Amino acid sequence: MDSGVKKSGVTSSQVARRAGVSQSAVSRTFTPGASISPKTREKVMAAAQELGYRPNAIARSLITNRSRIIAVVMAYLENLFYPDVLEELGRLLVKENYRLLLFTGHMDRDSDPVFDQLMQYRVDGIILASTTLSSHLSEECATAGIPVVLFNRTTERDAVSSVTTRNREGGRRIAEFLIAGGHRRFGYISGVESSSTNRDRFAGYQEALAEAGHDEIAIGVGNYDRAEAEAAAREMLSQPNRPDALFVANDHMAVAVMDVARYELGLSIPEDLSIVGYDDVGPARWTSYGITTMSQPLKRMVEATVNILMGQISSGEIEAEHRILSGELMVRTSARLPKTGVVEIDGRRIYKPGKS
Amino acid sequence: MDSGVKKSGVTSSQVARRAGVSQSAVSRTFTPGASISPKTREKVMAAAQELGYRPNAIARSLITNRSRIIAVVMAYLENLFYPDVLEELGRLLVKENYRLLLFTGHMDRDSDPVFDQLMQYRVDGIILASTTLSSHLSEECATAGIPVVLFNRTTERDAVSSVTTRNREGGRRIAEFLIAGGHRRFGYISGVESSSTNRDRFAGYQEALAEAGHDEIAIGVGNYDRAEAEAAAREMLSQPNRPDALFVANDHMAVAVMDVARYELGLSIPEDLSIVGYDDVGPARWTSYGITTMSQPLKRMVEATVNILMGQISSGEIEAEHRILSGELMVRTSARLPKTGVVEIDGRRIYKPGKS
DNA sequence: ACGCATATTGCATACGAATGCAAAAATGCT
DNA sequence: AGCATTTTTGCATTCGTATGCAATATGCGT
């Protein structure tokens, strides 16, 4: 009756018996680089095939003390930027023979249950995107010897690496672009005010505006959230002296802001109002929006993240490393064009002041 | 010097020694429902706290033969529907004390390496979204006693459960709505033609149109992909006898189609062309699009998925179960309104023929 | 063919926690 | 207090694989 495959759970010992070798031989067959003769290897492989054997990763992890699992903590999946990151992460990690354990939701407070689980699975590394880690927890990771990489955010804390882009320069670039476009009244819709990306983007923006003599900036708080950004835009743009140039801290919000500006307030973009975003995420490229935006080099960012992780895992040295990449100001239709500085590079229009 | 915590890896035995009890006692302290006196439990807890002990999930899995990990295979993250699903899945699984191992990318062919890994980790269940499983692989899961649930797709194959919505009825409803709107020439932009969702949506659409005497349907192939949908729309809508009513198999494509219709072909929506989508995903609600679309009850779908999985895991019985939910036709601005049948329910407009 | 170097193999043990079983302790009852 | 019952505890074993070590087999040179 049950002559067939039983509830699976074929073990290396069973394969060994079948192949007439020791369990060690089976193990060695499936361990790259282990000492095993082609002859026995073949016998083992044949037996394994017949029984449908697959090494048990759990048991292997237990003894090697390597789970080959990377934990990714990510909230804020409504912003397409992060799903894109996730997809690319999956691609790269699988290539490195790692698995991706996903935790959605935030883990800000200390002693978070998510963190507990994360530690229980003895993950080999942690990637934090759109989330931060309390100082206590990051310390714990360090002492546990687990590398942590912050993705698209950074911190002064030791022992935690990060991958970001030059947000300050990005903010500056946007300011320069808008100034060159002849705008006079500037606005900013912020992300989460305590986040490093928001701070830096705004700092650069403000700095460059100030240098050009523009000290007043209308500010609304969007918290990287559609609804809040809409509310902020509604308020800011219905003022009589509303800005004619608006930097929205990311594209996810910029899309919402554009809809409010156009359809609730009847403003023409870019005639009445120029909008610039950040990230260069999918919808920014859709014709309805065509957002002029600072791009973040997603693939290279993910690559750097995986790279840091792999380095720290294999070396065992957890030294905080900070990779900072640069993006480009992608010029589309949501903002007035400056007279000079827009160049075309294989089909994409980019703002590079200095070059015509 | 290193009097502090060492490279972590605190074991239950260490805690036991510290607390002056046996390793079993420690284990029992952390096993809900195990026989342990409050007194010793407290001693153990104290020792665990001091040493920073956390049960090793890997070791636990090995002996309990339960990994408490669910594999989620998901491609197509550009379609916001899936990130939303992922987020909700994460929420629910964590509530059930399960972890989510994410595999991105497809696994259509047999003997896929992804599948191998999946089996190696002895996951307790598998959720397949936007991917299918070859017959060989699904059999293997069955014999291995691993429950599999197809999300938003289905199959005739035994032993594989599924959660879907009434796609056929959805297609019918859309046809009825468009007919009631007074349209005369109908079009369809398909998803992946072999997918069950696409087949069913189209079947219902075609059926209802035929019943009303509309036998001709212009068809374009979109493969659930933006670029392909754009190309298909471009071609279909530049014909002299182009449709005035177009059902696009999902919102992800519908958005692209609207942009092509409006900005490349200069069509007014819904005056020149009505567009109806499927899913009711984020961008469908954005003012720029305002897509009239069949909603899929995402939360309830995810709930059903987790529910099936938990049931099969705890009972050990893997009997294919098919949950079929229904959505509503959300009425917005991308399609002409019929004279009757649109009702308003807490702020949302829905098409319910028969009711005025 | 012999001896030595090298490649393979099997044995035994370890990884960290869960659990059946029997011993020990605590509790209840008269 | 004394006995029966229940609760708590520790011992020993188990899960499936990897690996150091010693034993055995293979290959090479002369």
Image (cartoon, coloured by chain):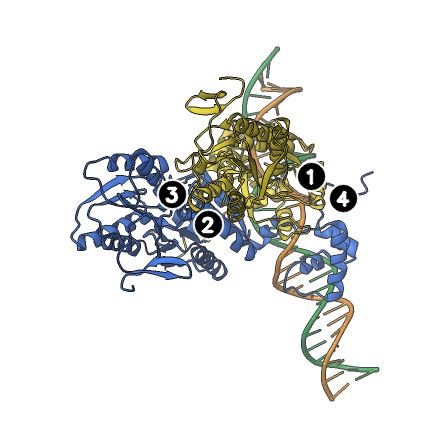
Chain colours: A yellow, B blue, C orange, D green
| Residue designated by label 2 | B85
Judged from the image, the secondary structure of the residue bearing numbered disc 4 is loop
| Number of other residues with Cα within 10 Å of mark 2, as a class: few under 14, some 14 to 19, many 20 or more | some
**Figure check: D11 above or below A187:** below
Identify residue type, mark 4: Val
The lab-note entry on whether marks 4 and 3 share a chain reads: yes
Q: CA distance from mark 4 to mark 3?
A: 51 Å
Identify residue type, mark 3: His
Specify the quadrant of the image occupied by residue D30.
top right
Q: CA distance from mark 2 to mark 3?
A: 15 Å
- Closer to the chain start, of discs 4 and 2, is 4
Mark toward the viewer: 1 or 3: 3
- Find residue A145 and name its label: 1
- Find residue B252 and name its label: 3
**Tags 4 and 3 touching, CB below 8 Å:** no
- Find residue B5 and name its label: 4
- Nearest the viewer among B197 and B283 is B283
- The chain containing the residue under callout 3 comes to B
**Figure check: B355 above or below B242:** below
User: Can residue A153 be seen from the camera position used here?
Assistant: no
Mark toward the viewer: 1 or 2: 2
**Tags 4 and 1 touching, CB below 8 Å:** no
- The chain containing the residue under callout 4 comes to B
Q: CA distance from mark 1 to mark 2?
A: 33 Å
Judged from the image, the secondary structure of the residue bearing numbered disc 1 is loop
Judged from the image, the secondary structure of the residue bearing numbered disc 3 is helix
- The chain containing the residue under callout 1 comes to A
Q: Position of residue A180 (x, y in %)?
A: 53, 25
Quadrant for the C terminus of chain B, please: bottom left
- Closer to the chain start, of discs 2 and 3, is 2
Q: Position of residue B339 (x, y in %)?
A: 26, 58
